[in-house]
Amino acid sequence: MAGPLQGLKIVEVAGIGPGPFCAMMLADMGAEVLRIDRLDAVGEDREVGFMRPGRNSILNRGRRSVALDLKSAEGVATFLGLIDSADALIEGFRPGVMERLGIGPDVCHVRNPRLVYGRITGWGQDGPLNQAAGHDINYIAISGALHTIGRADGGPVAPPAMIGDIGGGAMMLAFGIVSALLEAQQSGRGQVVDAAITDGAALMASIVYEFKAMGLWSNERQTNLLDGGAHFYDTYQCADGKWISVGAIEPQFYSLLIEKLEIDDPEFSRQLDAAAWPTLKQKLATRFRTKTRDEWCAVMEGTDACFAPVLSLDEARHHPHNVARNTFIERGGVTQPAPAPRFSRTTAEISMPAPYAGEHNDQALADWGVDRSWLTSPNAASK
């Protein structure tokens, strides 16, 4: 049996970042996701923004593509024909753009009252910043999340677009769409899902806000339990220049860590004394530099010392644990993370590689029962 979302039909208006990741998640779970690309993006080597995604795109995997001119009456009519049989929609334009194109929620809900209309933006559909340009770093900045990431001797460190675009945006939208689809089964009515990355990033920081509410979190970076302030929760460089991570918070795990390190120093009994952390961190740093990363892995990996090597993207796919679980798979010559999470019956899978824009105009529109007679063929449009 295919994934747990088999039978759902979702229209995705092409975008970058969080929208495609959300669509990828739903397609991995078995939903039929039809990507709507711009007509001027048709062609196997066309640039989209600063990228040439093509077959190597991971975020666009698992779905077909139809190219439409949504600024034309014909393109809008075709789009609304698709909405008639869709269960959900994903769009990531600035607020008001879909309305100006004539395909906003009000119009779509007249055609299909059960439609779940998923919207992903940085700032949200309303608020004083809703029309401003921005990117992941800006959205996680005002959520408070970015302030918590970095070293004490420097400023905040920008992570790749995972906390905002992916975790706070795409995953929240996917959760919102599935939640609204479940509710629509009871009510018979669709609704708009307003997924703002700023909201989602703030929600992802809930554990930090909880610590702060308990008086256990300082605004000063690297003075806290989970931000690299504690000597037992940080990364350390080894003799070969590679890095390892330790996260031995619980006393029994901490004791094992110290035992595995062959440390006999009474100062390490002050585990939770924050005043001792800087000194103990220096001592651990010195100790970890006495062996290579692989040597430390041989001593600690797989034990309760809460230890793991810090792997590069190339190294991660070869780690024995990831290999055993097929965490990374290869499709069409592209190594990529496998669908997650795992299901005992309805196995999630990648149904097809990423499409070229407009690659499936004829067949996909026919399958969705939409008149395609007016469309320019992809081959003609790409010449």
Image: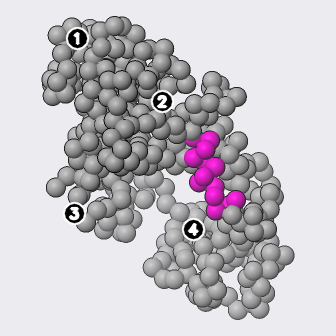
Looking at the image, is mark 4 or mark 3 nearer the viewer?
3
Q: Which circle's residue, 3 or 2, is located before the other in the chain?
A: 2
- Residue underneath mark 4: 244
Q: Which circle's residue, 2 or 4, is located before the other in the chain?
A: 2
Looking at the image, is mark 2 or mark 4 nearer the viewer?
2
Q: Is residue 115 left or right of residue 278?
A: left
Image: magenta residue range: 197-209
Identify the secondary structure beneath mark 4.
Answer: strand
Q: Between residues 129 and 282, which one lies in front from this camera angle?
A: 129
- Residue underneath mark 2: 92
Inter-mark Cα distance, 2 to 4: 38 Å
Q: Which circle's residue, 4 or 1, is located before the other in the chain?
A: 4
Amino acid type of the residue tagged 2 in the rendering: Gly
Inter-mark Cα distance, 3 to 1: 40 Å
Number of other residues with Cα within 10 Å of mark 4, as a class: few under 14, some 14 to 19, many 20 or more: many
| Magenta span main SS | helix
Magenta stretch contains residue 198: yes
Q: Which circle's residue, 4 or 3, is located before the other in the chain?
A: 4
Residue 383, placed above or below residue 289: above
Identify the secondary structure beneath mark 3.
Answer: loop
- Picture quadrant of residue 150: bottom right
Q: Is residue 223 left or right of residue 374?
A: right
Inter-mark Cα distance, 4 to 3: 36 Å
Q: Position of residue 349 (x, y in %)?
A: 25, 51
- Picture quadrant of residue 261: bottom right
- The disc placed on residue 345 is 3
- Residue underneath mark 1: 375
Q: Residue at x 38, y 47 (%)?
A: 183
Q: Is residue 342 left or right of residue 276?
A: left
Q: Between residues 334 and 214, which one lies in front from this camera angle?
A: 214
Q: Between residues 223 and 120, which one lies in front from this camera angle?
A: 120
